[in-house]
Amino acid sequence: MTAAVVLFTADLRLHDHPPLRAALDAADEVVPLFVRDSGVHAAGFDAPNRSAFLFDCLASLDAGLRKRGGRLVVRSGPVVREVVAVARQCGASEVHLSAGVSRYAHHREERLREELEHHGVELRVHDAVVTAVAPGAVAPSGGGHHFAVFTPYFRRWSDLRLREPLGPPRKVRVPEAVESEPLPARSEVEGVSSDVPRGGEEAGRRLFGRWRRDGLDAYEERHDDLAGDATSRLSPYLHFGALSSGELVHLARERGGPGAEAFVRQLAWRDFHHQVLAARPESAEKDYRTRHDSWRRSKEAEEDVAAWKEGRTGYPIVDAAMRQLRAEGWMHNRARLLVASFLAKTLYVDWRVGARHFLDLLVDGDLVNNQMNWQWVAGTGTDTRPHRVLNPLVQARRFDPEGAYVRRYVPELREVAGRKVHEPWRLPAERRAELDYPEPIVDLDEGLRRFKQARGRE
């Protein structure tokens, strides 16, 4: 009786899972393994919102495996130690793993390969599982390891033929002798935001099915509509791999139309950032393109950051977005851009401060998309217009013209009519006193001058 192990990481699904398919083809019995990695805990990446969603994903994965005669094996501790222990216990000849792009993922792969080889076990790493197109699958024709600008990358990405999505397995036979810890549950996690959605492959597939039917066609027109909330909200499921981005590309293209094209473009952005970080893993912490050292680090700056985190900046569109983040562990993409610009450019605070706060709360927060998007907005990353500044008032008037998004998340302003909700400081003094809402912490023109002066000195 032959055996293999599949180490699940950011690919918590049964549909379109090449490592699982390869393991089932190679062995009579397969151990689907998830390790609650102590290294992830030590790095501070198991924030409450993500832990709650992750535990939902594990429960969904286990339920899907049990329907097919299998089960999920859960272990806790250093990932290399636990994988080797399970492989030795079941007599596995192979361990299958989806490729990652972070420094931690690369280091994990290296240590796994070295230790497994010591025990006569082969590590097989599979590309294009976490992404639709593997990092490095397309490269600049003029040389270089990766694309630094999205548009030429997208042209090459679009021409590439994607592999056909795989169906879920019919049968999974797990060695009886391999024991598992009890599945962790969302109820065990403290500090979870009130409106974090239910995780898991089943929930993700239902959500995508509804949105593909009812929302995809209008996506190009409505994806920036803050009040309309017309985006897919699929990012947490993609982050944990409960959904396959490659399969979503296929299904969107089958639907066709401008909305589908715009949605596929967003999936390509995700792949773009993966290939950037794969080539430059230090960019998770260091400026990718242009280094800036003049960020504000004063006591006043700390107070501004605290107001930004609490959604008390005095700019309603910014505050609504920050309160949405705290309540839902998620934020509309347009809102992410404008609050990041406000922190990094209007307040001129180091982008890493904002990126860390996002990672503390976002269900979909990861080193790839979170860090690279923050760098893009801050002007240290791949944006070809690094000095652009998003004016929150202009953004509010364009993407929340009647103030419905603001009123949804800033209850102090629900009684302010129409577009006046975006500039409460213009209301009469006695009306402002009734609102219990702060005055702006910065003058926008002053913030813009400070930004230009700082960048001009560097």
Image (tube, helix red, strand yellow):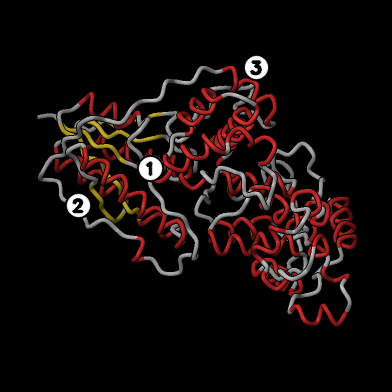
Q: Which residue is mark 1?
A: 201
Query: How far is mark 2 from mark 3, CA to CA?
Result: 48 Å
Which residue position holds label 3?
141
Query: In the image, what residue type sits under mark 3?
Result: Ser
Classify 187 as above or below 376: below
Q: State the count of labels.
A: 3
Are circles 3 and 1 on residues that touch, CB within 8 Å?
no
Secondary structure found at label 1: helix
Q: Of circles 2 and 1, which is in front?
A: 1
Q: Amino acid at mark 2?
A: Ser
Residue 344 image offset from top left, x and y in percent: 74, 56
Q: Earlier in the sequence, mark 2 or mark 1?
A: 2
SS class of the residue under badge 3?
loop
Q: CA distance from mark 3 to mark 1?
A: 38 Å
Residue 442, x across and y down, in percent: 83, 67
Residue at figure coordinates x 23%, y 47% from the top left: 73
Quadrant in which the N terminus appears: top left
Q: Which residue is mark 2?
A: 180
Q: Residues within 10 Å of mark 3 (few under 14, many from 20)?
A: few
- At horizontal 22% and vertical 57% (from top left) the residue drawn is 182
